Amino acid sequence: MEQLSNGFVSVASQTLPSVVSIRVDVESQQPEAPQGLPFPFPFGGGRGGRGGAPEVQHGTGSGVIVRADGVIVTNNHVVEDARRIMVHLRDGRVLPARVLGTDPATDLAAIKIEATGLPVARWADSDRARVGEWVLAIGAPFGLDATVTHGVLSAKGRAGLGQTSIEDYLQTDASINPGNSGGPLINLRGEGLGINTMILGRGTGVGFAVPSRLARMVTEQLAERGSVTRGWIGLGLQDLTADLASNFNLPPASGAIVSEIDARGPSARAGLALGDVITAVDGRPVTSSNDVVQTVTGRRPNDALTLAVLRNGQA
């Protein structure tokens, strides 16, 4: 146990310098968000608002330095509509930040401070992460800077939560709360597995992070050009339920059915047809329609993609 404890200490000390606390001011007439999913933005209530003037609400979040010249990844909902963003560095400096770009589809954003030589976080390969492995969450819950909690990676590939249009979450029981938004979920090598984004009720031990595979691609594009382009193949898909699988003489959860095709899209040009069952993408088995969506949206336009397809029972 002492060896594990020392491991936690070492990883935290390596990672903390690249994690920042973010303070934002937002003008809003809207009431505070309800508890639940995603993170309710941790505003402390209204400031001002006299005479019908917009309220100035103050919120906190977290971020991760990903480039030594001051590029930071955080959540879109942390900086959305912010009129002022201040970044608190581990060395005590407090610097203003500007938004480079946002991606509501993944609830990610890239911001920048004017600084050089900053400590940079290392990305992990989230695809190689193992369910059950130890993880640490670092951030500023309730504005408490440099808070470290631990737990395990509870699940991978969580989707269907209905919060963003692209969902492919890592689930963890590491304690995360409002203010952790945008902070890293890290492995015991001190590498960022994901960006903490959502919780399913406070104190439940059910939190979600955008995996590094997706977060890294989005952040790089936002930093380069302020927007994100991603793969699209012009398909509508439906999960292969037990009843449908029986009709196709297939085991359940062994593919996704093509339910719609854009006549102008690459799938139509490739010859796919309604009723085709996609069973693998680039050699990886498909268990749900979300498997296809995750792979496609994780690729850049003009990338080649190989689909294994069943049509009328024939591969």
Image (tube, rainbow, N blue to C red):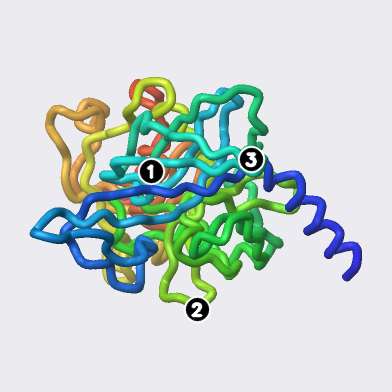
Residue 171 in view (yes/no): yes
Residue, disc 2? 204
Q: Residue at x 15, y 36 (%)?
A: 262
Real-space Cα separation, disc 1 to disc 2, in angstroms:
44 Å
Image vertical order of residue 34 relative to residue 284, above or below: below
Q: Residue at x 60, y 22 (%)?
A: 116
Q: Position of residue 283 (x, y in %)?
A: 51, 40
Mark 3 residue element: helix
Residue 40 vs residue 261, the one in the foreground: 40
Residue, disc 1? 315
Q: Nearer the viewer, mark 1 or mark 3?
A: 3
Mark 2 residue element: loop
Q: Say which amino acid is labelled 3.
A: Ser
Real-space Cα separation, disc 1 to disc 3, in angstroms:
49 Å
Q: Is disc 2 surrounded by few (<14), some (14 to 19) or many (20+) residues within 10 Å?
A: few
Q: Residue at x 49, y 30 (%)?
A: 113
Mark 1 residue element: loop
Q: Quadrant of residue 229?
A: top left
Figure quadrant of the C terminus: top left
In the visual, does 308 lie left or right of 206?
Answer: left
In the visual, does 19 lie left or right of 102?
Answer: right
- Disc assigned to residue 18: 3
Q: Position of residue 231 (x, y in %)?
A: 33, 32
Q: Position of residue 154 (x, y in %)?
A: 58, 67
Figure quadrant of the N terminus: bottom right
Q: Residue at x 30, y 57 (%)?
A: 57
Residue 292 vs residue 247, the one in the foreground: 292
Q: Which residue sits furthest front?
A: 51
Q: Say which amino acid is labelled 1.
A: Ala
Q: Which residue sits furthest right?
A: 2
Q: Considering only order in the chain, which callout, 2 or 1, is on the residue closer to the N terminus? A: 2
